[in-house]
Amino acid sequence: RSFAWLGRDLSREKAVKIADLNLKGVYRLNQVQRFYPGNQLGAHVLGFLKNEQGLAGVEFYYDGVLRGGGVNNPRLAAAGVSRKIAEGSDSASLILTIDSHLQNILEQKLKSLVASTRAKAGVAVLMAPDTGEIIGLASLPDYDPNRFWEFSDEARRNRAIESTLDLGAMARLFQAAVEI
């Protein structure tokens, strides 16, 4: 049989009041929803959710851990993830090494460079060389994970990890940077 939404995104208080009426055939459904306060800032790093499932970025890679579905990657368990999380009986939080201030500067500089060169796309990664921590990662065009469906697949594509690089060109680029 079919159903109809009587209301969505209701406040908790309102939902409890309706549930307390014990109306036959009226049920309450809790849904997970993420809000990304930085909007497009770091979108390719964070990714997004659809129907409570991570579909890109950190949301995708660590989906099982964040939802309490267990650790899919043995390296995470070896890195000290708690037994409850590893077994999937508890969810986890992640702390990213992205610096939001530097991320914003990186994105603005990349946008300026892409505009000035009339490039169709661009990518930049800022990494701490001693630890390998990613401090900033930008990929253009970008998108807003709060409204990811309004953007094309091309805009949502993270060129830093999904594109192949010409290693010879990269070597020449680094050599040129050393000579400056």
Image (cartoon, rainbow, N blue to C red):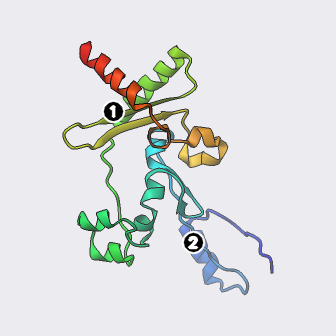
Is the residue 29 above or below the residue 142 in the image? Answer: below
How many other residues sit within 10 Å of disc 2, few (<14), some (14-19) or many (≥20)?
A: few
Farthest top residue in view: 180
Residue type pointed to by label 1: Leu
Q: Which residue is mark 1?
A: 102
Is disc 2 placed on a helix, strand or loop?
A: loop
Q: Are marks 1 and 2 in contact (CB under 8 Å)?
A: no
Instruction: Kindly identify the residue that appears in the image at 49 percent across and 43 percent down.
Output: 162
Can I make out residue 11 in this image?
yes
Q: Residue at x 47, y 20 (%)?
A: 112
Query: Residue 105 occupies which quadrant of the picture?
Result: top left
Residue carrying label 2: 30
Task: Please name whichever residue, 103 or 180, is drawn nearer the observer in this view of the structure.
Answer: 180
Q: Residue at x 31, y 77 (%)?
A: 84
The residue sitting at 21% across, 43% down in the picture is 131
Specify the quadrant that holds the N terminus: bottom right
- The numbered mark, 1 or 2, whose residue comes first in the sequence reads 2
